[in-house]
Amino acid sequence: MKQNLALFDFDGTISKKDSMIEFLKFYSGKYKLYKAYVTHPFWLIAMYLGIIEKGKVKEKLWVYLLNNASSIEFAKKAEDFSLNILPKLLYDEAMKKIKEHKKIGDRVIVVSASAEDWLKPWCELNHLELLATKLEKFNDRLTGKMTGKNCKGPEKVNRIKEILDINNYNKIYAYGDSSGDKEMLAIANYPFYRKFKD
């Protein structure tokens, strides 16, 4: 009998808040994060006008805050956040549903546009697979840039299909909360949009 597949977006689906914003506040401090926005308002204006894709603005923010950071120290902070802060930001209903899927033997994968660095320790602790945006590291330093594409929209499906054949699964469940999840929801037999709430 074929196994079922359950695909979960993270930010806004499993988590109540944007994990990227929460991590950057934890890592850089609220002042430095807000300064990045205040001193670069054209990033946000261009994004809302559709001139710059959201992923590019995210990368500019990462470069501003993370460029030349020690990859070792960054990994320690990311793990601390992932294991100690992140669990406090999650929907109870989402965690219950993940446990339900795992209990009946479904393959569960978290598919996120956030960076894998601050999601992976939590996923590993909960025995979940993860597909997420990757941060570039060079000579033990971060550049702030992405390695590969932002894991959002069509790229979510591309990343999923890189590691599995969706035809090998009996039923596919997908959970998302934004337009960046519509392609992933489209490949599911059972798509759930904004299912989890407080």
Image: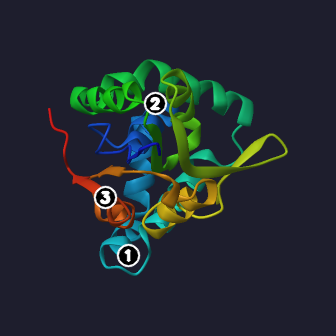
Q: For the residues carrying marks 2 and 3, which lies nearer the camera in this image?
A: 3
Give the CA separation, mark 3 to mark 1: 36 Å
The residue that label 1 is drawn on is 46
In terms of depth relative to the viewer, which is nearer, 72 or 10? 10
The residue that label 2 is drawn on is 26
Q: Earlier in the sequence, mark 2 or mark 3?
A: 2
Picture quarter containing residue 48?
bottom left
The kind of residue tagged 1 is Ala
Question: Which disc, if any, is residue 189?
Answer: 3
In terms of depth relative to the viewer, which is nearer, 97 or 119? 97
Identify the secondary structure beneath mark 2. helix
- The reply to whether discs 3 and 1 touch (Cβ–Cβ < 8 Å) is no
Any part of residue 151 in sight: no
Give the percent coordinates (x, y) of residue 98. Answer: 35, 32
Residue 166 lies left or right of residue 46; in this view the side is right
Q: For the residues carrying marks 3 and 1, which lies nearer the camera in this image?
A: 3
